[in-house]
Amino acid sequence: MYKIIDNPKMMTKDEIYNAYNGKWVFIVKANITEHGRLVEGIPVILGDYQYDGIEDGIYDKYKGDEYEQIISYTLVPLNNTITSVFGVGLA
């Protein structure tokens, strides 16, 4: 199940972690380091798993230069894995 965040705002990586730990987070306008680590961004969609809700087309509205850079931030606990951040392309 997914949720679109009402009135999203810029948040630091720590703020996102503290607010959404246990969820998969879709982030727009992300500021990442040259090594691909999240510094801050605007979380807009939460999911229980990666790209939750894609079948509903909820990510289509974030296909524009005004939302770049877009990333996926996984805070879902998985057996024998760690949380991760990676860039995505929704062309």
Image (cartoon, rainbow, N blue to C red):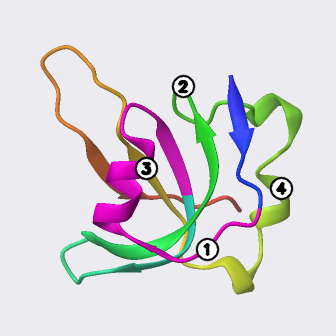
The earlier-in-sequence mark between 1 and 4 is 1
In the image, 32 versus 20, the foreground residue is 20
Please give the range of residues in magenta. Answer: 7-26
Helix, strand, or loop for circle 1?
loop
Q: What's the amino acid at mark 1?
A: Lys
- Decide: few, some or many residues near mark 4? Use Cα within 10 Å; few <14, some 14-19, many ≥20: few
Q: CB of mark 2 within 8 Å of CB of mark 3?
A: no
What mark, if any, has residue 48 been given in the picture?
Answer: 2
* Residue in the image at 33% along x and 50% along y: 18
Of the residues tagged 1 and 4, which is closer to the observer? 1
What mark, if any, has residue 19 been given in the picture?
Answer: 3
The earlier-in-sequence mark between 3 and 4 is 3
Of the residues tagged 2 and 3, which is closer to the observer? 3
- What residue is shown with label 1? 9
Q: Is residue 18 above or below residue 13?
A: above
The earlier-in-sequence mark between 2 and 3 is 3
Q: What's the amino acid at mark 2?
A: Asp
Of the residues tagged 4 and 2, which is closer to the observer? 2
Q: Is residue 25 magenta?
A: yes
Q: What's the amino acid at mark 4?
A: Asp
Instruction: Name the quadrant containing residue 46.
Output: top right
Helix, strand, or loop for circle 4?
helix
